[in-house]
Image (cartoon, coloured by chain):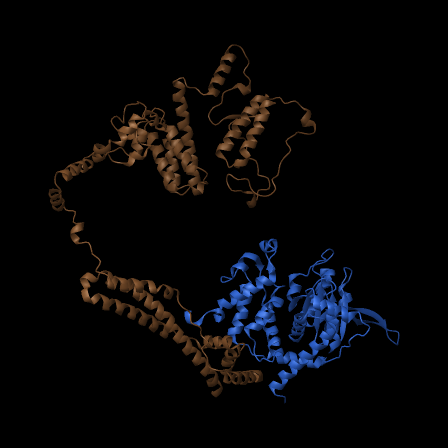
Amino acid sequence: MSEADALGRLVRQVVSQVRWRRVEHYGMRGAFYGALAAVIPLVVKGPLAAWAIPLGVALVIAGALAGALFGAMKSVAPVDAARLADRSFGLADRVTTALEYAGRPDRGPLGEALIADAIERVSRLESRQIVRRVVPREARFLPFPLALAVVLALAPPVPIPSSRAFNLSRSAEQEEATERGDTAMLDEKSRATPKDDLKRPSFEERDFAQASRSGASATAGDLSAIFKDTSLASQRPDFNSFLKKGDDRLKLLEQADRLPDLQSDFTTSQYKMVFKKSKELRSGLRPDQISPQKLKELLEEMERLGRKGGSWGADAAEGMEALEYGQQDKALEAMERALGKMRAMEERDRSGKGLRGGRENERGSRSREGSRGGGMGPEDQDFGEGEGLLPGRGRSPSPKGEASQRLRAAPYDVGVEGESRRGRKDSYDTNMTGRGGKMDSRLQYLGVIGQYRKIMEDAITREQVPRDYHSQIKDYFQALDER
Amino acid sequence: MKSQESRVQEFVAAFEGLRAEVEKIIVGHREIINHVLIGMFAGGHVLLEGVPGLGKTLLVKTLAEGLELSFSRIQFTPDLMPADIIGTNMIVEDAEGRKHFQFQHGPIFAHILLADEINRATPKTQSALLEGMQESFVTVGGMSRPLPAPFFVLATQNPIEMEGTYPLPEAQLDRFLFKLRVRYPAIEELNRIIDRTTHSAQAAVARVMSSAQVLTFRELIREVPIASAVRDVVSTIVMATHPQWEHAPDVSKRFVRYGASPRGAQALVLGGKVRALAEGRYNVSVEDLRALAGPALRHRIILNFEGEAEGVDVDTLIGQIVDSAESLTTQGKELFVR
């Protein structure tokens, strides 16, 4: 046991040193938090009067004492202390091993030799402080709350707003109004105006009420629509500033060229408005990155518009249902379908006004030619919605054709949207060789090019074609046109 | 009966003496010589890796000369067959004219076996060494034959000339206690090599240790105490090489595919015991583990694709793993903030 005691003495010394360092460490931390707490009574020293300073000092001391007590009460494992001694005195784990083997009956001859060696080395050691002081982070900032506390102690009491300041009762307001006199009364009247039930139309109402089919002046008298896109939109009319320098709104009305053209406003078209919103929603984002809340709001709007006479209400409702089940992809598909129907209705309306699209004019002229006796091949036929013509396949319900298996589909073949991926890019030689290259095509060149151009434009708009390929693709099609 | 101190002193003297004999021939490579001796006394086998001409084969030959042990050398080539290593049964005729099978011992039946350029032989031939290295006996024709004790394999391989070679499989690599990398000598050492090898007078190596002594020292080494706290560091180091371990450091998770086997932990502890005793110490310290972590673990850690692609140095990786393992145990932390 005396052997263990000799080693144990060293361990106890180390434990004691560790305890003192902990007392210092946690004491400084406690003093910091105590100093922070001491600032509070010094801030409110008015009501506390003479008690504020002693209370502050007591808090600092109490914090330091609590920290020191906490540090002193933390236990130190003898093995940890032994290892610390080994490291600090360069004993190469002799004390740790000897301490462990001293209590083992099966220590063996080398164990005995180890214990004897360790005791001899420990007895030759000079006692010194081996636990270094670690200043806590809080101690570096301790001067700041202390200095603040001293300043607050020396400074006059900080004025505290009285409870009267928060009294917003009508009687108090009336008392103030009486004291202020006539000018203030004018101000009071001008401020009372917003209390009237002047209900401004909400965003949705402004956008879509104007877009009603009848074209009635739903916003008649609502000049705020004029300032919709200016910084004045959010400001209330200020009678005082009008008296001084004239209303900014009136100045703006004098500059007719700066006013937004309400006739060409997007809000006149339901489809365009919704399409614009859906584009903003999807701009550059993957389906999983789109906010479900915003998507839901948009689908609700579409569904509401659909109830007024559109055929896309069911699609929008389906999208909302899909969104509730967390199927965002399906919701987006439903939204696309609804948008397609809205666009179809929009185009029908426009054709009624004689604003037919270029393709429709072209088809119309062709049909007229056909009626004059010209033959109408399969390429000249008009197609229904979702239908198209693929080279060599005749009428097809799928304008983009069948999806092909992607070559060497691999995770690292997927790039960031809008950028071409790194690494080597495979290219394919499109020049036909062999017998097929010598055979004449039975399809009309321009018809095929037109189909592919449409597919290309759709692909660029909707799919993830890297931006730096856009111009290259367009140049390619331009070159095909020139052939 | 000798006291423990005198036994330890005897070992220290023998270790120093053997090293001095090897250093008569080999210039520099002090650490390599130390690790080879540690591997031998720990009862393991050592793989030496280095470019040609650095003295790997000479080191092993010199070591064999310094020990009173039988020595054989096998130059591994692609056409080498297992029977060329282990031996084979041959038909022999006795004095009476009767024919019978007689086992012809292969070169593996030696105390010290130098397997030169081990990666030039086919895996079939390489695997002929497996049983001998692990179990210290070989089986031929259904009969197990013990190898002489102590049995110590020193293999060499060239890391740059990889064409026509068969890299050692992980199972065989794991059977080597240490893998040592023989570096190119410094200019002073090169000058000494030139002086020593271009003169007519060659130093003679004296035999300083017998096989019995080696076996006695091996037994002594196993008695060296190791504290449970130090043993915990060993376990933590080995576990930290496994990326699947929950406390594995980031470097392991990022660059390692497979970590070290339990043989790695055994190699660390046994090597640590020899190193401690060679320094006249009676216990294993964390410093011993740090010194031997590279040789004991570098061939047991397999890098993943990212590690290979980024050219991660396994020794650097092991250093980081040892640091993190020390901080995972209580060794690396400040006591009073715990």
Where is residue B78 shown, x and y percent of the image? 76, 59
Where is residue A235 shown, x and y percent of the image? 27, 36
Q: Quadrant of residue B89?
A: bottom right
Q: Is residue A295 left or right of residue B58?
A: left
Residue at position x 51%, y 42% in the image = A416
Residue at position x 31%, y 35% in the image = A231
Q: Is residue A354 left or right of residue B220?
A: left
A418 relative to A257, above or below = below
Q: Is residue A232 left or right of residue A471?
A: left
Q: Quadrant of residue A305?
A: top left
Question: Judging from the image, what is the letter of the chain drawn in blue?
Answer: B
A332 relative to A51, above or below = above
Q: Residue furthest top?
A: A372
Q: Is residue B115 visible?
A: yes
Q: Is residue A75 visible?
A: no
Where is residue A152 shown, x and y percent of the image? 25, 62
Frontmost residue, A471 versus A368: A471
A317 relative to B24, above or below = above
Q: Residue furthest bottom?
A: B1
Q: Quadrant of residue B298?
A: bottom right
Q: Which quadrant holds the C terminus of chain A?
A: top right
Where is residue B305 shown, x and y percent of the image? 59, 54
Chain A is which colour?
brown
How many numbered circles are shown?
0
Frontmost residue, A65 versus B320: A65
Frontmost residue, A11 versus A90: A90
Residue at position x 63%, y 86% in the image = B6
